[in-house]
Amino acid sequence: MNITRRGFFKLSGAAFAAGVLSDFVGQSTALAAETPLEWRLSDVMETPSICCYCSVGCGSILSVKDGELVNLEGDPDHPINRGSLCSKGSAQFNVRNVYDPESGDLILNPYRQTTVKYRAAGSSEWEEKDWDWAIMEIAKRVKKTRDESFETTDANGVTVNRTEAIGFLGGAALDDEECYVIQKLARALGVTFIEHQARI
């Protein structure tokens, strides 16, 4: 079959036009309105939140029903993650709730610690303590360690006002304001070993 260049373009154009026009010829497909589905989660209060793991700050939506967390998912309106969550963020739900392997019911995570556990030096048993006791005990130990290890001058007589017996490690889930306050506290105590874990 002999065809010129001009003929090839005419034939190609005609084939393209025929393909486009074929969509407008004949009976069109009618799309029936489907019965609206019920919401997957009904009668819940949704609250936006931030993921508790790394320092990225992905947004999540918490769904609470009758005082119980029933669902956790990525926030599609959040500018950082736009609704997606990594494997750690998706597993946040299991920090509080798990599914019972036998019944399949949603239950509180039996391994989640909700009270202070204290094991005295040399003891093999854990004791349950209240939060006020724990906070005061931590404060006493920090003050005792600082007082015993505080240096006002170094070996050359230079003023240093520091303690090298305490270190601060920030967590990746901390926001800027919390990090600022921790930094101020660490500097006020004279702590020199300050690090921040901001990695996944």
Image (tube, rainbow, N blue to C red):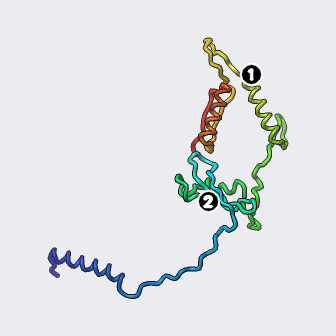
Cα separation between marks 2 and 1? 48 Å
Q: Eyeballing the image, is 81 above or below 177?
A: below
* Amino acid type at mark 2: Glu
Q: Along the line of sight, which residue is nearer the eye, 83 or 116?
A: 83
Residue 18, quarter of the rendered image? bottom left
Q: Eyeballing the image, is 176 above or below 191?
A: below
State the residue lying farthest toward the bottom: 26
Q: Which mark is residue 82?
A: none
Q: Image quadrant for the N terminus? A: bottom left
Instruction: Identify the residue under disc 1.
Output: 148
Q: Eyeballing the image, is 174 above or below 139?
A: below
Residue at horizontal 20 percent and vertical 77 percent from the top: 10
Q: Position of residue 118 (x, y in %)?
A: 81, 40
Instruction: Identify the residue under disc 2.
Output: 73
Q: Secondary structure at mark 1?
A: helix
Q: Position of residue 44 (x, y in %)?
A: 69, 64
Q: Residues within 10 Å of mark 2 (few under 14, many from 20)?
A: some
